[in-house]
Image (cartoon, rainbow, N blue to C red):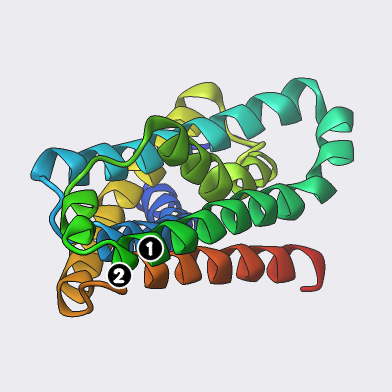
Amino acid sequence: MSIFVGSAIFFANSILLGFGLAMDAFSVSAANGIANPHMTLYEKFRISGTFALFQFIMPMLGWIIVHGFVLYFNAFAPFIPWIALIILLFLGIRMIIEGLRETSDEGTAEAVSAGRLKKRTLFAQGVATSIDALSVGFTISGYNTASAFTASLIIAVVTLILCLLGVNLGIRIGQRITGRATVFGGMILIFIGLEIFIKGVFL
C-alpha cells in the first residue's frame, strides 16, 4: 500500500493514533506531578520527553519487527500486558511505601517531592507505558520507511504535549494534597497497570 506522507488523512490518523497511545503516558505523567508538586521546568520536560521518545521508538521498532521478525513478535505479544502490569505494580507499590515513609518523617515530604525522578524509574515508566505501541507496527506495516518515521514522530510530539499537560495537572492536584501526594501517585500507577492488563488480556 502506497502512503503519501503529506496527505491530510495520514496526519489526522497519526495524530489520533498518538492520542490513543499517549493516554497511559499522560496518566503516569499526572501521577508523577502529583507525587512531585515542586518539580522544576527541566524535570517536566525530562519526564515528558522520555515518554515521547519511547512512544517514537516503539512504533518504529514494531514496524521493523513486522517487516523482519513477525513470527517472533507474535510469540512475544501476549506478554506485553503482563510486562506493563508488573512494572507499574512494582513502581506504584514502591511509591506508596515511600509516601508513607515521607509522611512519618516531619519535614521530609517537601524535600523529597522537590527531587528528581530517578533515571531507572523514569525508564521503567517509559517502557511500561509504551510497550503496547509495539503492536502499532501492524497498524503501520503498509507504510514505507519515511511514512513510518513521520507517523512515529507525530505520535511522539502528541505524547510530549499531553504529558506536559498531565504533569502540570498532577502538580496542581499534588499541591492540594501535600503529605498524601506520593501515596496517591502510587495508587494511580497501580490502577494504570491493572487497566493496561485488563484491556490487553480480557478485552
Amino acid at dot 1: Gly
Judging from the image, what secondary structure is the residue with disc 2 in? Answer: helix
Residue 161 in the figure: left or right of residue 87 = left
The disc label shown at residue 99, or none: 1
What residue lies at 71% left-to-right and 64% top-to-bottom?
A: 197
Say whether disc 1 or disc 2 marks the residue closer to the N-terminus: 1
Q: Give the vertical position of 186 relative to 154 (above or below).
A: below
Given residues 121 and 103, the one toward you in this image is: 103
Q: Is residue 5 visible?
A: no
Q: Give the vertical position of 116 relative to 90 (above or below).
A: above
State which quarter of the image contains the N terminus: top right
Q: Position of residue 115 (x, y in %)?
A: 21, 43
What residue lies at 70% left-to-right and 69% top-to-bottom?
A: 199
Given residues 44 and 104, the one toward you in this image is: 104
Residue 4 in the figure: left or right of residue 175 = right
Cα separation, mark 1 vs mark 2, equals: 7 Å
Judging from the image, what secondary structure is the residue with disc 1 in? Answer: helix
Q: Position of residue 24 (x, y in %)?
A: 48, 60
Residue 83 in the figure: left or right of residue 169 = right
Q: Is residue 153 visible?
A: yes
Given residues 125 and 16, the one toward you in this image is: 125
Q: Position of residue 42 (x, y in %)?
A: 13, 38
Quadrant in the rendering for residue 174: bottom left
What residue lies at 28% left-to-right and 63% top-to-bottom?
A: 166
Q: What residue is pinned by disc 2?
A: 181
State which quarter of the image contains the C terminus: bottom right
Q: Callout 2: 10 Å neighbours few (<14), some, many (20+)?
A: many
Quadrant in the rendering for residue 106: bottom left
Q: Do callouts 1 and 2 mark residues in contact (Cβ within 8 Å)?
A: yes
Given residues 10 and 198, the one toward you in this image is: 198
Q: Give the vertical position of 6 relative to 36 (above or below).
A: above
Amino acid at dot 2: Ala
